[in-house]
Amino acid sequence: MVSVWQTPELSDEIIKGDEIFESTTCIVADIVSAKIDIMCLVQNMAGVLTSKEVEYREKGMRFFTKVLKELPKDYLTQMQVRFISNFYTDRLRDYHRVIPPVLEGYLAIFEMENYDMQKSGEFLRALFREVPCQSQVRQDRLNIYLIIKKLLEKDVEHMKSMGPNFAYGFISAMDGERDPRNLLFLFEFIPTFLRHIPLGHLVDGMFEVISCYYPIDFHPSPDDPQAVSRQDLADELGPCLCAIPEFGEQCLILLIDKLDSTLRTAKMDSLKLLALSCRTFKAEAYGPFLKALWSSLNREISHKTDDELKMSAHEALSTLIAKLATSANTDQVFENFIKGILISMQTAIAESTTVAQLVQATKVLLTTANASNESCVIVTKAMIPAALAYYELNPSPKLQIATLDFLGDLNDITKHWEVTEQIEKQIIEIPQLCLTAVSQPSKEYQIAGFKTLIRVKSVLQSELVLPFVEVLIHNIQHSQENDVLSVSVEAVHAIARKYPELIMSYVVKGKCDLDNLTRDKDALQKRLNLLSNLASIDDFTKVIIEEMLKVITSDDQDASKVVEALSESMSNASLYTVQKVTQIESDYGLINSILTWLLKELSSTTKESLTHGFALISNTMSSLPAEKQQIVLSKHMQFVLEKSKTEESYFVVLECLYNSLHETVYEPNFPDIMSLSLQWALLSDNDEIRNKACGLVAHFLNKAPFGDKFDALYEVLKNHLSSCNRDDEQLCPKVIMLYGWIAKALVLRGSDMFHFWLQKIIAVLSHPNYTKLGAKAIHLIMTDFPDHLNAKYHCRISLLYRQRMFQNFSVLTEKLAVSCQTKESVLLSWAYILERAPKSVLNNEIKKVAPLVIDSLLFDNKDLLLVMTDVLSHFVKTKHMVIADSTQTILPRLLVLTKYVKSMDVRINSLQCLFDIANTYPTQLVLPYKQDVLFDLAPSLDDKKRLVRNMAVKARTRWFLIGAPGEPTPN
Amino acid sequence: MTKIADNLNPHVYEKESERTITSTDHDEDVVDEFDEREIFDIIRNINDPEHPLTLEDLRVLEEKNITVNNNENTVHVNFTPTIPHCSMATLIGLSIRVQLLRALPSRFKVSVTVTEGTHASEHAVNKQLADKERVAAALENNNLVQIINQCVSPL
């Protein structure tokens, strides 16, 4: 059968209706399979394409365009494309109704492979001449822009050769465009257009057409699903206005004008535009406008309440200066501009009476100095002497301290630009001022002075070292304030790096009198602290450590003080790195000396000073690499092991040697030590020993590699436990705690074996007599200890172990029979788990957790209430509706808790929950309770603790706003 | 309605630091008495009706202008308008009163007045603020309550 498109009836079909439009795919298929020639098709369409009725011609063009769009891009020959292109160009002269399909069709035509660019000129000329772009509908206007954009992308050179006519055509086409989507498209395209097409005499015209949109003032319609926002348009318009250097003058005039506008958005846009323009415009372009620009920028920078505006102004100023600096060598303008800023800021500084005002001015100067190398030199040269003078003249402490900070900042910037040498003459004065500051008795002065000194330490002159050292040593010996102490130590460090010999002679030998360390008892502890801190500096390590170890080994009565000082300093990781500790151990045999001392003193010295010794050994051990650990062990193990079998005090020594081993260290006698630890864990009546023994058991179980080594240890454990007497009431609590340690060690390494031990603990929970111990064991599993089972001691810590605990506990307790005696402990165990479990897990399990939380609010248990109110507050803040559904139950319980006598923290937490509820849930939900809550909150306003009252005020004033006029709307 | 603010570019002062929390604050057994600082903390963050600034920023309220007597249960607050003919003085005073009414225990008798010699119609404002019935009547006015609530609600 012959299809209709193979006959001239096609024209009638098209005129008749739209059905034929459905069959274009078949037509295209026919064309491609050469069943019909495209020329034939056109001839068959002749009737409709040349019809006298506009409507039919439009239909014909629409049909033809559809066919063209569906044709493969490479099918038509050059000849055919040229013919069709001519036809379409000709059609532009037709009635306006015919234009839309013509435009659409042409978009398809020049996508074709055989399209001849020469044809484009003709088409564009006709287009610009015959079609008034702005009289078309939105989509057609977009098609016109698309045609221009695509042609430019296809062949830039050809488009350039068309000369200003092309630019003129484009400018007049887009002039007056009002649709935001089209504008967004145009703004994205214009910078590319401007970069490629020379405008010639049309620069002014082009700028005028774009600049009329500036600043964008546009509000998208609220029900537009894909609204273009004001910000989108503004972001795209900026680059258009400063796309080419030729726009310089006009653009700057425009933005200065808009900077003075009262509209905030106009200011913001102008500041952004200024920063952006520096990328394209030449430095010279700004010359005539600098005065006006600075006065506007200065006004925005000194804005009091709008921080965003202030930040933008700073950014604009910074880029502007960086730009101007590029012409610093050829032009006086740059220097004059910076000097202008200096003068106005110096005036501002001189007039400032509050720190806020001072900081505002200094910030501008810092921005200026930070922008470029050249500006940095000018600003710091002028400002360092000025700031020094200001400090002298100004009596207000706060301002003086702020000045010190400012000097430190200036110094940092000179370092950043590496211009320190050029302004050394000025910077060198700063340490002198720091000295004046730290000579004041007030703590604030000292801290600020030392902090600045640390920053400018590189220019510290040797003659100033002595006076500084005087103040520092006085501080370190007498100051009670922790922050002064630490900053003083830091300052000594800084000076010592610069002048090691001076500090050595003044401090180590002089003030601390290292050579007769213990003869002078005065402030011995503080001197020791200083010395042990200083020992972390390489130059001093040898002298100090050797002297200290001499004291420790020589049976001196002050040895314990030395050990304490060393232990405290060396555990501070910011002073002593792992490498440093290792080096000290291998160079001076630290552990050996301490151990000798410990073993000797074990029976005589107080427990506290021994503790420092143990801490020092275990810290040093943990820093050593595995091989060194093994060497230390082989040296001391035998003796200590034998001793600790009978005496529990020796066991502590054993523990501090073994608890920080690497996973890889394993010795054949580990099962013996394990068995020994188990023995003390269950036998000792001393809590501390038992704790350490349990800890050591846990360390072994956590670190031993799976396989024979682990199995051997686990076997020891099982045998030992099965040999215990089950009826011994005394033993029960100890065993339960041991279960806790075992479960913790196993869950930390991510082993499923912990399940077995957790089950045992949960079984304990349901036993009325021991239920509290069960909760304690759970607490133990969930808590982090500073001296057991953590990364510092090389334990295996799997990710998400708390989450595993949460999930396993939650499954295991499902079947647990809870009586009224055990309920509190079960909830308390839950509390320990919830406290530490990641909040995201709780959010997923809210259906399970929420009832527990609500139940818990009835119990008189401080720990339980604290955790549960905390979790409740978290749920409320994340707007869970499960909680919202129970407000009727929760609110009265919380209100009772606001009067909980035993703990102020519970009172505060419950008030916090009440605040959160009012602040989070919709008005209609909480309004019914408003009056009751307000009434019940009144007594809390008169609570005896101020912190409770503060929270009560917060909660009550928030509840007052519910449903009242002026209620804050949730965002 | 765009009313231009009375004082377009007010001077912004430094904020006091937050009250430092001492160990006695956490001691369950110590009774903390109300002091000037606590009253100041309750009202320092009230917003100015004209600017996005607090009364503390503008130094309308200062700790030294507050007196508390725990034994006689009285609180007295003096506030200082930024300029002598500030039309907002009564509104500011009313906001302070409302906030204290909500946040202090009922045992306290609160009085709020303009600092002497800082406002053109000082006596009229003081009289209005002291008159219980006028204050109560003002709080019946929804528009007024709305403005006050916006002032006292945390930003």
Image (cartoon, coloured by chain):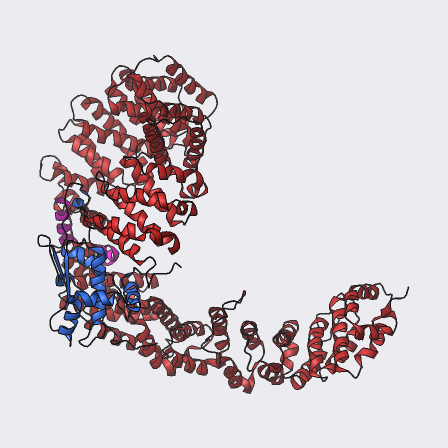
Chain colours: A red, B blue
Quadrant assignment, res A395: bottom left
Of residue A629 and residue A6, the one placed in the foreground of this image is A6
The spot of residue B52 in percent (x, y) is 30, 67
Of residue B51 and residue A737, the one placed in the foreground of this image is B51
The stretch in magenta equals: A451-477
Q: Quadrant of the N terminus of chain A?
A: bottom right
Whether residue A425 is visible here, answered yes or no, is no
Quadrant assignment, res A826: top left
At 33% from the left edge and 25% from the top edge, which residue is drawn? A771
Q: Reply yes or no: does residue A463 show up in magenta.
A: yes
* A778 over A362 or under it: above or below: above
Left or right: A856 as drawn, with respect to A61: left
Quadrant assignment, res A98: bottom right
The spot of residue A262 in percent (x, y) is 36, 78
At 24% from the left edge and 66% from the top edge, which residue is drawn? A356
Q: Quadrant of the C terminus of chain A?
A: bottom left
The spot of residue A194 in percent (x, y) is 55, 77
* A582 over A263 or under it: above or below: above
Left or right: A615 as drawn, with respect to A709: left
Across the whole image, how many numbered discs are drawn on residues? 0
Q: Reply yes or no: does residue A475 show up in magenta.
A: yes
Left or right: A664 as drawn, with respect to A310: right
Of residue A129 and residue B133, the one placed in the foreground of this image is B133
Of residue A455 and residue A723, the one placed in the foreground of this image is A723
- Which secondary structure class fits the magenta region best? helix
Whether residue A591 is visible here, answered yes or no, is yes
